[in-house]
Amino acid sequence: MSFVPIDLIIFDCDGVLVDSEVISCRAHADVLTRHGYPITSEQVLVRFLGVSEKDARRMVEQEIGRSLPDDLESQVNAATLQFYASDLQPITHVAAAIAAIDLPRCVASSGTPDKIHHGLTCAGLHDLLAPHIFSASQVARGKPAPDLFLFAAAQMKVAPERCLVIEDSVPGVTGAHAAGMTVLGFHGGSHCPPGHAERLRAAGAGLTFDDMRQLPELVRRIGADALAG
């Protein structure tokens, strides 16, 4: 495939920067089950990976035909942050990969600002990425809509076609692709099942990888291909 020059790297957070998806799904499942919607963390992972908490809530409410508590997202966040303090780890080698890429960068995550900040801080990555951290709470529609990616690009003053997105979820890849951006699909998180790379490619990821040590070379290769093209 052909590439255009890249002026900005946009990182998803959960599952790309921090190995948090399993933790988040456990917290989400605990809270939903407590409110009369029995679900396992594995089922949360399949249904809601990459989906904002607001959109996940809408999906459940439509299914059960009643409203969930107004503070559901706050309850999920509180449970997640409690698990983060003891269990959260960065994605292996991600800090070194970020430091090795000499391009502007930002974060565009489906999580709430508090959750993103706390997760990056617990994993020791916040200072590498601040202050350019954007949340789905800042746009009307979360992933798989392109809104968050377009918002991040606008805030960073970079044209969408010159952005490279690193995503681990089908909704995230779908949204980035819809925004007209180049997407790399990462499938090295502990939550990624067999066959996940193929699903990411089917959603629009140009290339997939499972080791963050590969990322600087992939970025270099995309830049070289753009210059050659």
Image (cartoon, rainbow, N blue to C red):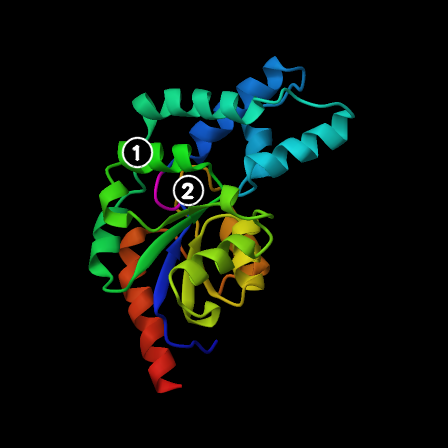
* Residue in the picture at 40% in, 86% down: 229
Judge by depth and name the residue closer to the eye, 6 or 15. Answer: 6
Percent across and percent down for residue 185 are 45, 56
Q: Where residue 122 sits: x, y (%)?
A: 28, 31
Q: Residue under circle 2? A: 15
Q: What stretch is highlighted in magenta?
A: 14-18
Camera-side residue of 134 and 59: 134
Answer with mark 1 or mark 2, whichever residue precedes in sequence: 2
Distance of label 1 from label 2 (alpha carbons): 10 Å
Q: Which class describes the residues within 10 Å of circle 2: few (<14), some (14-19), or many (20+)?
A: many
Task: Please name the predominant secondary structure of the magenta segment in the image.
Answer: loop
- What's the amino acid at mark 2? Gly
Mark 1: secondary structure: loop
Picture residue at 33% right of the left edge, 74% below the top: 223
- Return the x and y of residue 15 as percentages of the image width and height: 41, 42
Q: Name the residue that disc number 1 marks.
A: 89
As drawn, the residue found furthest toward the right would be 65
Q: Dot 2 lies on which element?
A: loop
Question: Residue 144: in sight, yes or no?
Answer: yes
x and y, in percent, of residue 2 in the image:
46, 78
Measured along the vertical axis of the image, is residue 91 above or below residue 11? above
Residue type, label 1:
Gln
Q: In which quarter of the image is residue 102?
A: bottom left
149 relative position to 10: left or right: right
Q: Is residue 47 visible?
A: no
Which label sits on residue 153?
A: none
